[in-house]
Image (cartoon, grey):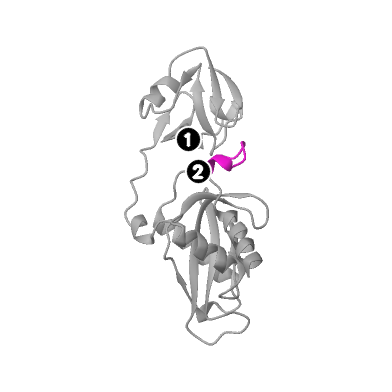
């Protein structure tokens, strides 16, 4: 019994990775809208079930920025959900759990337990009991998304992110596109100037009329742009 408890304590750590433990080259996207998160998640969960109409999908917990290492390291915004059978089902307990990780508006991974005492279910209960996931009620009114900023000279649309400027879109044929910048990249410096915490002023720095611009990214990349 002691060995079993130790095993599941170790398993619980699979969802307890802190953001700092993420791979150096992984960049989290903006925190997802809770309604959109559940929409993506429910579609993925139902698609994975043999009889979709037999289940209700519950979202008792909000998401956290964490890693999940069930099938290799996967990073994103993770939560534990609950499946409740509303009709007789085979191969599954009528009440069981699942883990889902979503980021960049896509489902990164999904693990469904077919038993109420299965590995995923035990991990989820442990994580929730340890207070590592907020209740879903805290997700009901998320902070509004940062206003998009347009840097016309470069052909970029950006949003403020904790690490700097998150690139939302890159105009085709623009200076940014020719330099190889793509959506999802986070810019941290422009000509040596830190973009962290600058808010709307980032657009002014990036849009300055200079002959050349050197951009550093959160993953250690460098881009040289000539006007």
State the image quarter where residue 100 is shown: bottom right
Direction front: furthest residue: 2
Task: Assess disc 2: are there few (<14), some (14-19) or many (≥20) residues with their C-alpha within 10 Å of its C-alpha.
Answer: some
Q: Which residues are magenta?
A: 19-26
Residue found 61% across the figure and 77% down from its top: 50
Where does the image place residue 225, in percent across and percent down from the top left? 56, 20
Task: Residue 11: tell me if it is visible.
Answer: yes
**Residue underneath mark 2:** 29
- Residue situated furthest left in the rendering: 141
Compared with 223, 5 (above or below) is below
Which residue corresponds to the image point at 47% horizontal and 51% vertical from the top-left? Answer: 64
Magenta part mainly helix, strand or loop?
loop
Toward which corner of the image does residue 22 lie, by quadrant? top right
Residue that appears at 50% across and 59% down: 127
Q: Is residue 218 left or right of residue 209?
A: right
How many marks can you see?
2
Residue 204 got which mark?
none
Q: Nearer the viewer, residue 43 or 14?
A: 14
* Picture coordinates of residue 179, whole percent (x, y): 60, 25
Spatial distance from mark 1 to mark 2, Cα to Cα?
8 Å
With respect to residue 208, does 138 lie above or below? below
- Lower sequence index among marks 1 and 2: 2
Q: Secondary structure at mark 1?
A: strand
* Residue 133 locus on image (x, y percent): 44, 56
Could you tell me which quadrant the N terminus lies in? Answer: bottom right
Q: Is residue 189 magenta?
A: no
Q: Residue pushed farthest bottom?
A: 88
Cβ–Cβ under 8 Å for marks 1 and 2: yes
Tell which of 155 and 39 is nearer to you: 39
- Which residue carries the number 1 mark? 166
Residue at the outermost top position: 211
| Disc 1 crowd, CA 10 A, few/some/many (<14, 14-19, 20+) | many
């Amino acid at each position: 019994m002691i060995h079993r408890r130790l095993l599941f304590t170790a398993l619980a750590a699979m969802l307890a990775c802190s953001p700092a433990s993420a791979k150096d080259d992984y960049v989290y996207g903006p925190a997802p809208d809770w309604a959109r998160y559940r929409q993506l998640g429910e579609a993925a969960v139902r698609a994975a079930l043999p009889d979709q109409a037999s289940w209700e999908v519950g979202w008792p917990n909000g998401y956290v920025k964490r890693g999940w290492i069930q099938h290799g390291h996967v990073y994103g915004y993770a939560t534990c959900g609950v499946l409740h059978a509303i009709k007789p089902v085979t191969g599954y307990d009528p009440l069981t759990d699942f883990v889902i990780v979503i980021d960049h508006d896509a489902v990164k991974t999904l693990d469904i337990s077919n038993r109420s005492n299965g590995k995923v279910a035990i991990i989820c209960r442990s994580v929730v009991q340890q207070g590592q996931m907020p209740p879903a009620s805290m997700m009901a009114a998320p902070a509004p998304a940062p206003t998009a900023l347009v840097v016309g000279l470069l052909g970029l649309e950006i949003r403020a992110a904790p690490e700097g400027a998150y690139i939302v879109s890159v105009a085709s044929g623009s200076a940014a596109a020719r330099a190889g910048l793509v959506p999802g990249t986070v810019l941290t410096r422009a000509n040596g100037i830190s973009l962290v915490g600058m808010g709307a002023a980032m657009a002014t720095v990036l849009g300055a009329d200079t002959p050349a611009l050197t951009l550093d990214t959160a993953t250690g990349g460098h881009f040289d742009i000539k006007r």
